[in-house]
Image: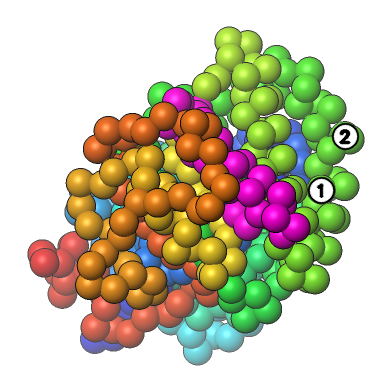
């Protein structure tokens, strides 16, 4: 008997222009457009296997080995239902196709990084879910078409259907059919963009993005100014910066937009604080690192950005990553040796130090554990279809023990 199964992996994305606010909470339609960099799946990814089988009684999902309830009318159920609808359309056009749209599915997914810790697991998770079902159902859909469905799982997930530099166009139609992701530039356009993730906390966060942004929509006057007068011009300017590979402009806009997102969080009633003292110290270090460069006649060398949590993501051209890792480690000693996937350091490992002219008093040194880990990665590609050997379900249709 045929086994109908597909496995894909999908990347995390970290926004430079932040999505924060919905105009429709069911369809997940945003109050502003956003733009992100897709990170390399060689380092951070969700891997998902989907199987359709006539013997399955109901749709089931396992996340990191634990079964999650698929709630009726919930986001997961909506995504699965929408994918089955697309499959049904394909089957209607070709009667020789197996009627997979009528079978229940078993879905098994793993993240190779902490889930629900502000590392955008919902983005890679829903992108992997949608792309694995698209592969299972052999849908002729484009990544933008699939992004319409991933968006209904988690807004930011729509941007993980592409690699490189990705915009989520907010759209204007009430049915959401124009609220989708498009590629601004593939990673090959600007492969030099690297990212250092400073894991400040891998705990589950206090205020989820979903509830936090809704409170902001309801109570923040500053958000209305951001939506009407700030984001549209920033979307244009950062797109131009990416197309011109202008890191100075890219960095300036990215930092400004992170700052404004955290300002609207603070402007929410009651206020929401996602950054902590460690996050703010990292901002001070990057600001000073850039100041020294500019004082010496150079340009901005790094950009920080923070999502709905205290973890920092630092974007920079590859050539600056060595200095940036040394800088962070100088203030935030690490319990574990730095994993050095790009071979920046020799066998001796990293020694903390600051660049000449750096004012060390901009931040106080912290103890081991303030920054729990550093992940060095770079701009990456979009979802990948994997081989049968990578499947996460066993012959019985349940998660494989490994
Ligand atoms: N691999 C996956 N497959 C399917 N769903 C997933 C996967 N990984 C995460 N999710 C869903 O995303 C939820 C976590 O999303 P949440 O927004 O709380 O955290 P986050 O994405 O890590 O943080 P943020 O989006 O704010 O950066 C999980 O509870 C689960 O429902
Ligand atoms: C701060 C952000 O990371 C917010 C992400 O919010 P989510 O996409 O997690 O929210 P839901 O649509 O409610 O699932 C900014 C961004 O990624 O653009």
- Circle 2 residue: 228
Q: Nearer the viewer, residue 339 or 399?
A: 339
Q: Nearer the viewer, residue 119 or 176?
A: 119
Principal secondary structure, stretch drawn in magenta: helix
Where in the figure is residue 3, as x and y percent of width and height?
A: 28, 81
| Residue in view at x 52 percent, y 22 percent | 273
| Residue in view at x 22 percent, y 57 percent | 337
Residue 377 included in the magenta stretch of the image: no
- Circle 1 residue: 234
| Residue range corresponding to the magenta coloring | 274-302
Q: Mark 1–mark 2 contact, CB under 8 Å?
A: no
Q: Is residue 336 above or below residue 243?
A: above
Disc 2 residue: CB within 8 Å of ligand 2? no
How packed is label 1: few (under 14 Cα within 10 Å), some, or many (20 or more)?
Answer: many
**Mark closest to the chain's N terminus, 1 or 2:** 2
Q: Which mark is residue 142?
A: none
Q: Secondary structure at mark 1?
A: helix
Q: How many marks?
A: 2
Q: Is residue 250 visible?
A: no
Where in the figure is residue 119, as x and y percent of width and height?
A: 43, 47
How packed is label 2: few (under 14 Cα within 10 Å), some, or many (20 or more)?
Answer: few
Disc 1 residue: CB within 8 Å of ligand 2? no
Separation (CA) of disc 1 from disc 2: 11 Å
Where in the figure is residue 255, as x and y percent of width and height?
A: 67, 43
Q: Nearer the viewer, residue 14 or 149?
A: 14
Q: Secondary structure at mark 2?
A: helix
Name the residue at the bottom extreme.
Answer: 96
Q: From the viewer's perspective, tell me whether residue 393 is left or right of residue 359.
A: left
Residue 275 included in the magenta stretch of the image: yes
């Amino acid at each position: 008997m045929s086994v109908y199964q597909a496995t894909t992996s999908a990347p995390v994305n970290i926004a430079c222009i932040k999505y924060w606010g919905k105009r429709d909470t069911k369809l997940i339609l945003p109050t502003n457009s956003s733009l992100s960099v897709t990170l390399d799946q060689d380092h951070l990814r969700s891997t998902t296997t989907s199987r359709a089988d006539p013997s399955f009684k109901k749709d089931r999902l396992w996340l990191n080995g634990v079964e999650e309830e698929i709630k009726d009318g919930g986001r997961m159920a909506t995504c699965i239902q929408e994918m089955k609808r697309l499959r049904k359309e394909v089957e209607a056009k070709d009667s020789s196709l197996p009627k997979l749209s009528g079978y229940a599915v078993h879905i098994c997914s793993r993240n190779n990084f902490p889930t629900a810790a502000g590392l955008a697991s919902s983005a890679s998770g829903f992108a992997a879910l949608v792309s694995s079902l698209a592969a299972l159902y052999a849908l002729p859909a484009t990544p933008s078409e699939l992004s319409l469905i991933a968006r209904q799982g988690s807004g930011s997930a729509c941007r993980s259907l592409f690699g490189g530099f990705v915009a989520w166009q907010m759209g204007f139609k009430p049915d959401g059919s124009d609220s989708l992701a498009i590629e601004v530039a593939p990673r090959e356009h600007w492969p030099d963009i690297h990212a250092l993730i400073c894991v400040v906390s891998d705990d589950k966060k206090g205020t989820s993005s979903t509830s936090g942004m809704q409170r902001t929509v309801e109570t923040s006057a500053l958000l209305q100014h951001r939506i009407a007068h700030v984001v549209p011009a920033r979307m244009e300017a950062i797109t131009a910066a990416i197309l011109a590979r202008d890191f100075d402009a890219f960095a300036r806009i990215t930092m400004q937009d992170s700052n404004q997102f955290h300002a609207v969080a603070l402007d929410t009633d009651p206020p929401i604080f996602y950054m902590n003292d460690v996050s703010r110290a990292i901002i001070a270090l990057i600001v000073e690192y850039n100041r020294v460069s500019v004082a010496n006649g150079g340009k901005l060398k790094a950009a920080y950005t923070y999502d709905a949590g205290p973890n920092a993501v630092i974007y920079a051209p590859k050539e600056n990553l060595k200095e940036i890792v040394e800088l962070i480690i100088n203030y935030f000693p690490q319990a574990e040796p730095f994993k050095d996937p790009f071979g920046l350091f020799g066998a001796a490992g990293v020694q903390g130090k600051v660049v000449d002219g750096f004012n060390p008093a901009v931040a106080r040194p912290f103890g081991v554990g303030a920054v729990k880990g550093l992940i060095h990665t770079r701009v990456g590609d979009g979802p990948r279809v994997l081989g049968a050997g990578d499947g996460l379900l066993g012959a019985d249709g349940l998660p494989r023990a490994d």
